[in-house]
Image (cartoon, helix red, strand yellow):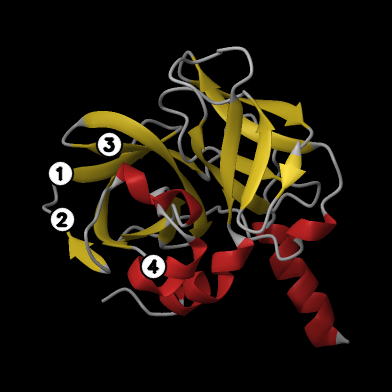
Amino acid sequence: MIALMLALVIVSMRSVSATDSKPHWWYRLHVSNQPTCVAVAVEEHWLITPWHCVQLPGQFQTFEKKTLFVKGVDGKSIKIKKVITPHNRYRHLGDIQGRDIALLQLNTKLEKWLPLSQHVKRLKAPLTVALIDSQRVHFLKITPLQIENKLILTSNITCKGDSGVPLIDEHHTLVAIASWHSGRRCNETGNISFFNRVDIFSSWIHNQIGNPVN
């Protein structure tokens, strides 16, 4: 009983609200000093972002310190130690649009992150998407149009620079990250936004974040 109470206390201390005024699990990825995609903290040393944002040819890559970093909502830069991708493990999901996931490993310890959702097929609408507008993160409530084996489809809510923005469920866990959208222009009528589900990568993610930072 004491152990259970202690576990509940620990969970409550680490729980993150999707409506935080400053979501410290939300980061902007910079490649060669240019802001690109969004990365989301999923553990104290790990962020998740789309594979296409780092465009790695192999399983794992080490970058020069000045090449790849993230900035949090507080404006502080954090250097990326390693980028890890699933590579061939999820080739059965098809092209890159079906396995558009990468992990970023940090030396810096993070204080807040979003736990991963494990029951995506049981989702209750609406979900929350965390977008950025004028350098401020804001939250929108949305209803999925369709949940597929690897993707969640929504109406056109993402645009250039939104790759990696999170979908969050009512339990404040990470459901999916924005991958791509149909059409060539933002806000084009009939466009669909595609989000890669994180639960289908959960075993790979946990295997990676279980390894200590060297």
Q: Position of residue 71 (x, y in %)?
A: 35, 37
First reached walking from the N terminus: tag 4 or tag 2: 2
- Residue at point 46%, 59% (across, down): 94
Alpha carbons under labels 3 and 2: distance apart: 12 Å
Alpha carbons under labels 3 and 1: distance apart: 8 Å
- Residue at point 69%, 55% (across, down): 15
**Residue that label 1 marks:** 67
Above-or-below relation of 10 to 77: below
Q: Quadrant of the C terminus?
A: bottom left
Q: Position of residue 186 (x, y in %)?
A: 49, 15
Q: Are marks 3 and 4 in contact (CB under 8 Å)?
A: no
Above-or-below relation of 61 to 39: below
**Residue that label 2 marks:** 63
In this picture, residue 113 sits left or right of residue 29: right
First reached walking from the N terminus: tag 3 or tag 2: 3
Q: Are marks 3 and 2 in contact (CB under 8 Å)?
A: no
Amino acid found under the numbered disc labelled 3:
His
Q: Which mark is residue 56?
A: none
Q: Are marks 1 and 2 in contact (CB under 8 Å)?
A: yes
Amino acid found under the numbered disc labelled 4:
Pro
Q: Position of residue 10 (x, y in %)?
A: 70, 68
Element type where label 4 sits in the image? loop
Alpha carbons under labels 4 and 2: distance apart: 18 Å
**Residue that label 3 marks:** 30
When asked about the image quadrant of residue 108, the answer is bottom left
**Residue that label 4 marks:** 86
- Residue at point 52%, 31% (across, down): 181
Q: Nearer the viewer, mark 4 or mark 2?
A: 4
Element type where label 3 sits in the image? strand
